[in-house]
Amino acid sequence: MEYVGILLDSSVYRGIPHARTGQESLVLYELAAAAYDLIPCYMRLEDIHLPSGTCRAYIHSENTYKLNTIKLPYTIHNRAMYFTTASHHKMAGLIQQGILIYNLRNRYKKVQIHRLLSRNSELVPHLPETEPATKHSLARMMAKYSDLIIKPSNGSIGSGVMRLTQRSALWQLSFHPKPGKWRQIRFKQGRLPAFLPARLTRKEHLIQQRIPLATYEDRPFDLRVTVQRGITGEWGVTGMFAKLAASKDAFITNVARGGSAMAVDRIFSSAFPHVAADKLQSRIHHLALTAAHQLSVELPHIADLGIDLGITAAGELYLIECNGRDQRYGFRKAGMPEEWAQSYREPMAYARYLLDQKPSAASLNNLKLIT
């Protein structure tokens, strides 16, 4: 048995003694790790001591979690987000000590991901036109498209997303001024609402051609495809589910923003009655895997992606976003417990793969408690 590190955000880490870890299931980590002769240890970056090569970590023992000081695990699965220079230096220090951190970074700018994907000619037809949002790019895109999405380049779970739609001679900007409340502003071409250019200057956004999504029971939906590396070290599709907008007029499908998650079987048969479901799923898998392979060429430490695919009523597929820290709970909400559990098994399988590749000098001393 060997340790595998699970690097967590402080908010999740603090809840471990009280079994309050939000959407992260430590039980599934424990079961998945045990299947590969691994023991998960849960840590924060600030609890790692580089000079001694040790860390403080929670380890499950006797039906509870206990803090121990241990030798740094050879492999660490990163589920935390770090943005400071000091944090990046510490991560670099871990790598210099020979520690393998997969998902080293799990938050990338959406514009950056779009550019990386656009280097693959096979993916280009599946990429909605996307630009960094400025006053000038906004004018260009509004001249070209009648339906646009504006969103933070570093955002997640649908936060801060706005929609621009052309209504005859007027444009309408739809957005959330506060949780649970919608607002629409109408304006003439060339007369943007005063707050919009200021917001784009204050925080980096992108502007994207909006894909006309297929609907299920009049609700637009897109797809979340979980793509992970596993026991062979290769990419595979763990599963996928549909994210349905809260209503026919809503343009955000995120579960955290009022959307709902559903298994795709019933949705596909309803939305695409004349398309063979197995062929459609094969196309979806191929596109998601092609995107994962392309990103891993440029970002070699990634091993876990949540890919959002838009699909039109005609069955056309588009790559909307690639998330470096997949929110796996969507499988649970979609009533897919096996896929939910599998989304925890694959990262542990990949840890076993990495451990099996390391020099044979490593021994069971890796489990020795220091204090």
Image: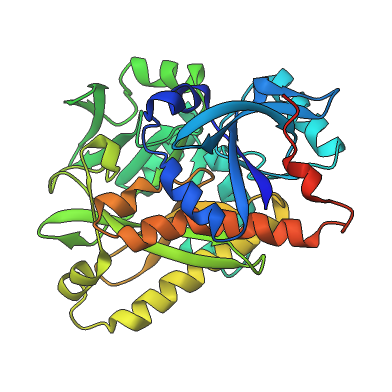
Q: Quadrant of residue 229?
A: bottom right
Up/down of 15 relative to 254, above or below: above
166, 221: nearer the viewer: 221
User: Farthest residue toward the front?
Assistant: 62
User: Farthest residue toward the left?
Assistant: 217
Q: Residue at x 66, y 69 (%)?
A: 232
Q: Residue at x 55, y 53 (%)?
A: 33
Position of residue 144 in the picture relative to residue 368 (left or right)? left
Q: Quadrant of residue 271?
A: bottom left
- Measured as percent of width and height from the top left, residue 236 is found at 54, 68
Q: Residue at x 54, y 28 (%)?
A: 66
189, 18: nearer the viewer: 18
User: Which quadrant would the C terminus be assigned to in this image?
Assistant: top right
Up/down of 294 relative to 155, above or below: below
Q: Quadrant of residue 36?
A: bottom right
- Measured as percent of width and height from the top left, residue 354 is found at 73, 57
- Measured as percent of width and height from the top left, residue 313 is found at 24, 67
Is any atom of residue 68 visible in this view? yes
Is any atom of residue 119 visible in this view? no
- Label count reads 0
Position of residue 145 in the picture relative to residue 180 (left or right)? right
- Measured as percent of width and height from the top left, residue 241 is found at 31, 60
Q: Residue at x 50, y 29 (%)?
A: 134
What colour scheme does the image use?
rainbow
Position of residue 72 in the picture relative to residue 77 (left or right)? right
Up/down of 340 relative to 65, above or below: below
167, 95: nearer the viewer: 95
182, 265: nearer the viewer: 265
